[in-house]
């Protein structure tokens, strides 16, 4: 949850939970979406935010006050995961080589890492200069996030061999890979 870099308290996950919807969210729903803290802790945060005006208590639950001066910053912080994906996609597109697939996996895909977690990426490309793209991604991800990037680069033939060998990592990619660009079929099975 990248917002915790800037808002390390329970406030960050609560704001992300509210920024993700315009519909009123009950205390239980905000608690579930935040994925952190106790229900009473989330209630305390919500009540303080209502008092501060960044959140409205409305029939059916709580909503982010999108007219509040801080709402733009909150929504930008809540979208840091999306911004990372957009920057990775732009870097891949600027590279110019043929890429079959680029995706996030691990804690970055599940969104359950912390400030010290690696950002795991899979790159499937048959280009001779694939390693150049990987080096660029490693450098850029570190600059953008402060986190180390762990990039696995494979050719389509290597991907096929891993699948054929029944490697556990392939099943993990099947289940959790968040495709940033390219086609999931590069994993070697129709998905």
Image (cartoon, rainbow, N blue to C red):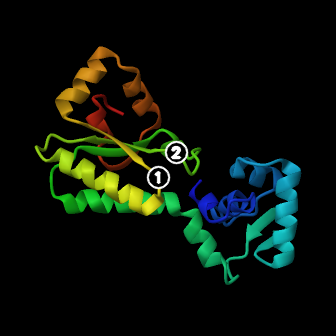
Q: Quadrant of the C terminus?
A: top left
Tags 1 and 2 touching, CB below 8 Å: yes
Give the residue at the far left of this rendering: 128
**Residue 76 falls in which quadrant of the image?**
bottom right
Tell me if mark 1 has few (under 14), some (14-19) or many (20+) residues whose alpha carbon lies within 10 angstroms of its own. Answer: some
Which mark identifies residue 117?
A: 2
Residue 132: image location, x then y, percent? 19, 50
Q: In the image, is residue 173 above or below residue 54?
A: above
Any part of residue 184 in sight = yes
Element type at mark 1: loop
**Foreground pick, 168 / 113:** 113
Residue 93: percent from the left, percent from the top? 24, 60
Q: How crowded is mark 2: few (under 14 residues within 10 Å), some or many (20 or more)?
A: some
Pointer 1 residue: 147
- Considering only vertical position in the picture, is 139 above or below 182? below
As displayed, is residue 167 above or below residue 174? Answer: above
In the drawing, does residue 48 fall left or right of residue 190? right
- Please state the horizontal and vertical placement of residue 139, each as a whole percent of the image: 33, 56
Viewer-proximal residue among 186 and 1: 1
Question: Image point 45% across, 63% down: which residue?
Answer: 83
**Residue 109 rendering spot, x and y as whole percentages:** 49, 44
Mark with earlier residue (1, 2): 2
Residue located at (27% from left, 17% from top):
164
């Amino acid at each position: 949850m990248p917002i915790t870099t800037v808002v390390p308290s329970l406030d960050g996950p609560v704001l992300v939970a509210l920024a993700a919807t315009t519909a009123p969210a009950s205390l239980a729903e905000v608690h579930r979406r935040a994925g952190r803290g106790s229900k009473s802790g989330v209630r305390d945060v919500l009540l303080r935010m209502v008092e501060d005006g960044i959140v409205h208590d409305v029939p059916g639950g709580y909503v982010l006050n999108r007219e509040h001066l801080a709402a733009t910053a909150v929504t930008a912080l809540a979208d840091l995961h999306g911004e990372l994906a957009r920057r990775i996609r732009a870097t891949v597109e600027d590279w110019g080589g043929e890429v079959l697939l680029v995706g996030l996996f691990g804690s970055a895909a599940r969104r359950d890492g912390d400030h010290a977690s690696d950002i795991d990426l899979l790159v499937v490309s048959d280009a001779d200069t694939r390693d150049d793209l990987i080096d660029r991604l490693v450098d850029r991800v570190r600059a953008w996030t402060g986190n180390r990037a762990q990039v696995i680069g494979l050719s389509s033939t290597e991907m096929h061999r891993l699948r054929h060998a029944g490697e556990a990592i392939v099943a993990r990619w099947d289940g959790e890979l968040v495709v940033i660009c390219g086609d999931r079929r590069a994993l070697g099975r129709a998905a």
